[in-house]
């Protein structure tokens, strides 16, 4: 049974595209057939993060409008044969997406893949509402920071009211993914802590991705972080999150501060 | 530098609890009252309908304001009632209109 999962946040720059690529690759690596769909029409970036930017011929808008057939627009990943990308258009605007057109494409994808990951644009406009419209599940990417949490709350409200599932009286299964978590700042009490965020958003936790240079390094070379350096802290956190999406029970690892020599000497502890 | 030393030796300057408290207050409002963006419009129309059953009003002189505070919010309704109010005339007008 195919699952449509939207990766959304409201706020921009929190890590939606990075997370879509990393989770998609992790799911594909465990044997699932996966397509990642870029809904950020006009500002596409998922192709770049996936390293497929030079292979884009047709895009989501072409398929929605019937200019191209779905198989013509799908790009197969060079590293994983069961991972595919449906890119967004770089030249059109979000008004080119229609509700019924998106519904038709999602329906077609459902018959071909186990997982359809929709990378939502920032904001709450048409692109974002259509990205979540047909979702069965949602990953709400949140940074431990007030404006991101507020926007996540708003998006959760939309998932509960504006999706096809909500309109049918069904639930969209929601998960919070905390990204750019900085253990040192958390220990100093400078960053919203995880329990507070979860309590405020009243939504279960999918994973905690630590702030890391590895994320930037992976996007530099156009490889999902889970494939670029599988042993890195963010890669392991994303793999754990993907296993939770598949229904596995995986113990949650809260990234810990790497304590320097001076700190150890002074006996400082992470709060 | 002195701040850093202070923190190193136990002086905590945790801002996270402030963030949490601000968010909790803000979101409780946004989810409830302000989540419905047309709440004030609805309130205004319904208050206007109720009051004008009994008093003749100028619809432009009905102000509804919502101000949110930390523990309570205030809903301020300001209705200007003209002195030359004539109830029978108002009722007649309403019958004409209805």
Image (cartoon, coloured by chain):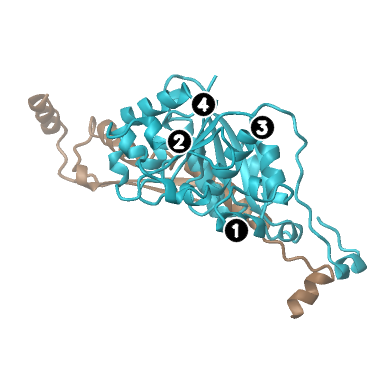
Chain colours: A cyan, B brown
Q: CA distance from mark 2 to mark 4?
A: 26 Å
Q: Secondary structure at mark 1?
A: helix
The spot of residue A204 in percent (x, y) is: 65, 35
Look at mark 2 in the image and give the residue it sits on.
A158
Q: Nearer the viewer, mark 2 or mark 3?
A: 3
Residue B25, placed above or below residue A165:
below
Q: Sequence-wise, which precedes: disc 1 or disc 4?
A: 4
Q: Marks 4 and 1: in contact by CB < 8 Å?
A: no
Q: CA distance from mark 2 to mark 3?
A: 31 Å
Choose top left, top right, bottom left or bottom right for residue B50.
top left
Q: Nearer the viewer, mark 1 or mark 2?
A: 1
Q: Secondary structure at mark 2?
A: helix
Left or right of residue A123: residue A50: right
Q: Sequence-wise, which precedes: disc 1 or disc 2?
A: 2
Q: CA distance from mark 1 to mark 2?
A: 30 Å
- Label 4 lies in what chain? A
């Amino acid at each position: 049974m195919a699952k449509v999962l939207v990766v959304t946040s409201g706020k921009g720059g929190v890590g939606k595209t990075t997370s879509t690529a990393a989770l998609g690759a992790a799911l594909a690596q465990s044997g699932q057939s996966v397509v990642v769909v870029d809904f950020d029409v006009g500002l596409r970036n998922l192709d770049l993060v996936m390293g497929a930017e030079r292979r884009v011929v047709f895009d989501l808008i072409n398929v929605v409008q019937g200019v191209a057939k779905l198989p013509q627009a799908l790009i197969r990943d060079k590293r994983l044969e069961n991972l595919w990308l449906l890119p967004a258009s770089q030249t059109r605007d979000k008004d080119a997406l229609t509700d019924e057109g998106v519904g038709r494409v999602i329906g077609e994808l459902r018959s071909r893949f186990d997982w359809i990951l929709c990378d939502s644009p920032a904001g709450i406009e048409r692109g974002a509402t259509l990205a979540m419209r047909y979702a069965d599940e949602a990953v709400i990417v949140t940074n431990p920071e007030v404006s991101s949490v507020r926007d996540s709350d708003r998006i959760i409200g939309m998932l509960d009211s504006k999706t096809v599932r909500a309109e049918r009286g069904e639930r969209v299964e929601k998960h919070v993914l905390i990204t750019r978590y900085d253990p040192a700042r958390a220990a100093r009490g400078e960053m919203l802590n995880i329990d507070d965020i979860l309590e405020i958003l009243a939504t279960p936790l999918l994973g905690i991705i630590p702030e890391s240079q590895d994320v930037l390094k992976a996007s530099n070379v156009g490889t999902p972080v889970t494939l670029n350096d599988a042993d890195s802290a963010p890669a392991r956190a994303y793999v754990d999150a993907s296993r939770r999406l598949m229904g596995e029970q995986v113990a949650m690892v809260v990234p810990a501060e790497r304590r320097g020599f001076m700190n150890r000497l002074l006996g400082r502890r992470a709060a | 530098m002195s701040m850093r030393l202070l923190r190193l030796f136990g002086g905590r300057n945790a801002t996270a609890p402030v963030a949490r408290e601000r968010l909790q207050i803000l979101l409780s409002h946004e989810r409830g009252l302000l989540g419905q963006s047309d709440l004030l419009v609805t309130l205004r129309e319904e208050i206007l309908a109720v009051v004008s059953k009994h008093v003749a009003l100028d619809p432009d002189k009905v102000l509804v304001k919502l101000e949110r505070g930390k523990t309570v919010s205030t809903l301020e309704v300001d209705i200007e009632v003209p002195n030359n109010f004539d109830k029978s005339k108002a009722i007649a007008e309403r019958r004409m209109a209805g």
